[in-house]
Image (cartoon, helix red, strand yellow):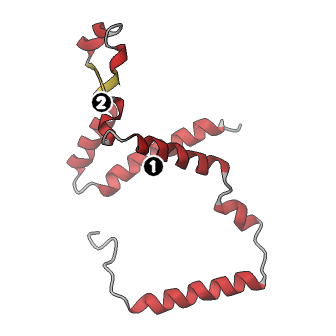
């Protein structure tokens, strides 16, 4: 039995989103409040449907600018579509790991990264998870 890849993407995406809510919330109540907003928040349709579907107002349906919650910038939608295309069409790290071969180019690149990482160890940086 193989799961449809689109369904698998959908399940994984939503699981990660829900898990991040708990990871980033300071308290349990904050996480629950965010989850309620995600799943039981207001549902909005574009203004052009208000005349035909106005009877749905009594069920909590609202009409307005769909991009209003994204700062009203159409560039955000373009970036989301561009990111989706990159994710869907380009090869991922698993492909490159499976086709990896040792050669001088990879050795030099690894040494450059190693030297850069070791030389930056003296820089002071705050530990990302210091609150945990």
**94 above or below 34?**
below
**Mark 1 neighbour class, 10 Å CA radius: few under 14, some 14 to 19, many 20 or more:** few
Residue 126 is situated, as x and y percent measured from the top left of the image, at 30, 78
State left or right for residue 111 relative to residue 27: right
CB within 8 Å, label 2 to label 1: no
State left or right for residue 68 relative to residue 120: left
* Residue receiving disc 1: 16
**84 above or below 97?**
above
Identify which residue is drawn at 68% across, 61% down: 94
Q: Which of 9 and 79 lies nearest the eye of the viewer?
A: 79
Residue 122 is situated, as x and y percent measured from the top left of the image, at 39, 92
Q: Which of 122 and 128 lies nearest the eye of the viewer?
A: 122
Dividing the image into 4 quarters, which one contains the N terminus? top right
Specify the label residue 40 is tagged with.
2
Identify which residue is drawn at 60% across, 51% down: 86
**Mark 2 neighbour class, 10 Å CA radius: few under 14, some 14 to 19, many 20 or more:** few
**116 above or below 22?**
below
Specify the label residue 48 is tagged with.
none
Identify which residue is drawn at 47% across, 92% down: 119
State left or right for residue 121 relative to residue 5: left
């Amino acid at each position: 039995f193989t799961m449809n890849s689109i369904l698998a993407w959908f399940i994984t995406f939503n699981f990660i989103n829900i898990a991040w809510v708990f990871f980033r919330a300071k308290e349990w109540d904050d996480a629950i409040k965010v989850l309620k907003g995600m799943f039981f928040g207001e549902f909005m349709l574009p203004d052009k449907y208000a005349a035909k579907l106005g009877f749905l107002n009594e069920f909590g349906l609202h009409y307005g600018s769909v991009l209003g919650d994204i700062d009203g910038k159409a560039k955000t939608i373009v970036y989301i579509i561009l990111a989706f295309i990159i994710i869907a069409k380009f090869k991922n790290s698993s492909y490159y790991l499976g086709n990896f071969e040792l050669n001088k180019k990879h050795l030099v690149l690894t040494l450059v990264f190693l030297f850069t990482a070791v030389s930056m160890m003296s820089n002071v940086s705050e530990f990302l998870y210091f609150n945990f």
